[in-house]
Image (cartoon, rainbow, N blue to C red):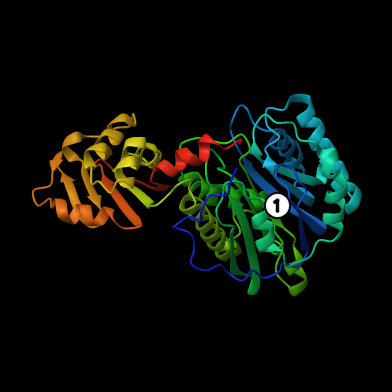
Amino acid sequence: MAAPPLSPLAPKSFPDMPSIDGVRIGTAAAGIKYKDRTDLMVMRFDRPAAVAGVLTRSHTASAPVDWCRTALPGGSARGLVVNSGNANAFTGVRGRQATEQTAAAAADVLGCQPEEILLASTGVIGEPLDAGAFSDILKKTAASAKPDCWPEAASAIMTTDTFPKYATRSASLGGVPVTINGIAKGSGMIAPDMATMLAFFVTDAPLAPAVLKRLLTTANDQAFNAITVDGDTSTSDTVLLFATGAAEARDAPGITLPSDRRLAGIRRALKDIMRDLAQQIVRDGEGASKFVTVTVTGAITKRSARRIAMAVANSPLVKTAIAGEDANWGRVVMAVGKAGEPADRDRLAIWFGDVQVAADGERHPSYDEALASAMMKRDAIDIRIDLGLGTGRFTAWTCDLTHGYISINADYRS
C-alpha cells in the first residue's frame, strides 16, 4: 500500500521534545508488514513506573488489549512494546501466544516479570503476528534505548497516519517543574469508546497508580473520547499513562490521593496535551481536508449534549456536505433529530462559524447564503447548536468525509 500524501491539516511545525528522567526509548524496522519501515517501539523504565490505562470497550478486542487488562491492575511497569503493521486482533490462540512471547522477550532484557511489560499493536486485523520473527530485534532495541527518541517513537507506531503525533507540556508540582510527554497514532477507525487509537504518556512526577487513573479517565473524556473520524471503534484502542517518579529526587512531593490539591497544574497540563494529540488525530483523518468543531449547548444534560454532538460529527451526510463546502444546515437538523435525545424543533438554533443559519425552528431571518458558503471554504469550521432546553454542553471534533477516505481504505490490505 502506497503511503498517503501528507494531510493538508498537518501541523506547520513540531515541538522539541525534552527527555524525561527514568525512561528510555528504542525503535527499529522489524519487517512486521513492510520492509525498511520503522514498526517497533520499546519504552524501558529505569525503575518500576506507576501506570494506568483506558482500553477499548470493543467485544472483539485484540490480544494486546487483553494482556493490558490483566497487567494494569498491578499498577507497575518496567516496559512498553508497541508494533505497527499488525493489530494481533482476531488471531485466537496464536495471538495470545504472541503476546506472551513478546512480553517474555522484553522482560528478559529488562530483568523483570512479563506482567510488568505493557503491550499494544496496530495494523491489519486477522493476520497472525509472528513474535518470534522479531524477538531478537526487540531485545536489541530495548538494550540500545535512549532518552531522546520521542519523534522516532511517534513515527514507529504509525499506520495510515501521514505525520507523527507528539507533544510535550510542563507543570508545577509542589513548586517543582515536571514534564509530560506524549505520542499518539490514529487516522482511521476512530470513534470514542474509552480510547480511540493508541496514545502513550510519560511524566517524571511521582504519582501513584490511583492518581494516574483518575487523571487519565477525567482528561480522556474531553479529549480522545470527544473525537471521531468515521464512527468506527478499533479493536486495539489503548491509552496508557506512566509516571517514572524521577522528579521526587528534585523534591517533588509524592502524590497518593486523587483529591490532592497539588495536582491542579498536572491536571491542566494532561488535559491540554491529550486534547492536542486528539485534535492532531482528527487533522490526520483519512482523506480529511477540513477540521470541524461541533459544540452543542442548551441540552438537558452533558450526556445528552455529547450524544447529539457525536450524531452530528458522525453523520456521513453532514461530513460530505462539509467536504463539498455546502452550507447545508438541514443535514445538521437531521442529525440532531436522529440522536434519540430530547430536542425541541421550535427552539433549535444553529451557527456555522459566526453566521447564524437557523433559529426558533426555521431558517434565520437574516440568513445569507453567500456568507455561509464563504464560511464553509475555511480549513477549520465551527458548527454550534443550541437546543434551548437546559445547561448541558459538549464539544466534539471531527473532519469531513472525502473520496480520499474511500481510496485509502479500499486498498488497505494491498
Residue 192 in view, yes or no: no
Q: Position of residue 34 (x, y in %)?
A: 70, 45
Asked whether 263 or 65 is in front, the reply is 65
**Circle 1: residue type:** Arg
Residue drawn 64% across the image and 62% down it: 181
Where does residue 67 sit, x and y in percent of width and height?
Answer: 75, 36
Q: Residues within 10 Å of mark 1 (few under 14, many from 20)?
A: some
In the rendered image, the residue lying farthest to the top is 92
- Quadrant housing the N terminus: top right
Identify the image quadrant of residue 113: top right
Q: Is residue 182 left or right of residue 344?
A: right
Q: Is residue 171 above or below residue 220?
A: below
Q: Residue, x 56% and y 40% (percent of image)?
A: 194
Q: Position of residue 312 (x, y in %)?
A: 34, 39
Residue 142 vertical position relative to residue 238 in the rendered view, above or below: below
Q: Is residue 58 left or right of residue 243?
A: left
Most foreground residue, 11 or 258: 11
